Amino acid sequence: MLAAEHLTVDYGGRAAVDDISFDVLQGDLLGIVGPNGAGKTTMFRAILGLQPHRGAVRLFGHGPRSLRHLVPLVGYVPQKISFDHGFPATVSDVVSLGVSTRRTAKGARLVREAGLEWGRTYGGLGGARERTAAALSTVGLGALAGRRIGELSGGELQRVIIAKSLVNDPLLLILDEPVTGVDAESQAAFYDVMNRINESGTTIIWSSHDLTAIERHAEKVACMDGSLFFHGGKEQFFKDEEALGKYRESAMQMHMHGHDG
Ligand SMILES: Nc1ncnc2c1ncn2[C@@H]1O[C@H](COP(=O)(O)OP(=O)(O)OP(=O)(O)O)[C@@H](O)[C@H]1O
């Protein structure tokens, strides 16, 4: 689904993402662990072609030149979502904003060539209205379709944003620290939704600081702090004292010296 090959992003001569290579296979639920400032967001932005980088990103078996045709088939939920709560829109309005008109016939053809099936669920169901309803039902918010967004809790709003990223039936979903600032009950609801989306066949990459959540919900783990120092199965990661120690050490340093981002 994705191959990062020697991905490097410099900010002012300092590598925020430092020569990272890894593969994501179809159906993976990959947790990306790294302390604040480890380069997770920068890496996601490079993968999506939003950030100048060195190295290569291959999506769905195709090289960097096809990236712009294929990115519309990737769902992305950024970490920082700003919302004007006074904006007079309903839950359905916001989710249907995600319906892409950008998807090209070329993207669909490239995906078919890669032997992938697109349009199984949300995208395959028809028009914007049907897709919106299907995505809302996946995140468990069918009953709130007509509710004003200003009247939602933080956890509900977060699931609305996830529904918005599902309306184009993404083959790959990237969630950047999706539970930041969300209460424990809503976190549990979120993880249920994430697991359900993955079980329905969508490949997921999500980033987190929370090792307990990673242990509970990820299948594979990639651990980074600028460079990637572990990528493999979850069981292997939690047995790997060296990788765990390195994560704790970089998290501790970040805690003591503050986050410069
Ligand atoms: N536009 C920018 N210009 C210069 N430096 C930046 C820029 N964006 C991020 N950085 C720096 O690059 C490093 C990686 O930041 P990034 O946001 O990718 O990390 P992260 O792992 O997503 O962190 P967090 O967990 O806090 O979200 C940090 O040191 C940050 O300060």
Image (spheres, rainbow, N blue to C red):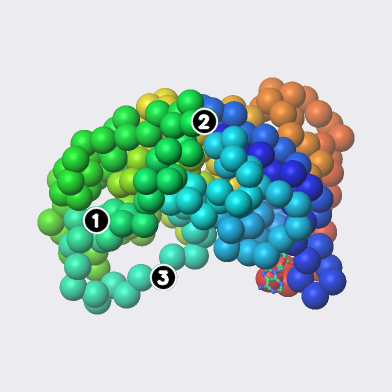
Q: Position of residue 247 (x, y in %)?
A: 78, 45
Q: Residues within 10 Å of mark 3 (few under 14, many from 20)?
A: few
Which quadrant of the rendered structure holds the N terminus?
Answer: top right
Q: Position of residue 191 (x, y in %)?
A: 44, 38
Instruction: Give the mark nearer the N terminus: 1 vs 2.
Output: 1
Q: Residues within 10 Å of mark 1 (few under 14, many from 20)?
A: many
Q: Residue at x 20, y 50 (%)?
A: 128
Frontmost of labels 1 and 3 is 1
CA gap, disc 1 and disc 2: 28 Å
Nearer to us in this view, 229 or 210: 229
Q: Is residue 153 left or right of residue 17?
A: left
Instruction: Give the mark nearer the N terminus: 1 vs 3.
Output: 3
Residue 96 - label: 1
Residue 82 - label: 3
Helix or strand or loop: what does disc 2 sit on?
Answer: loop
Q: Amino acid at mark 3?
A: Ser
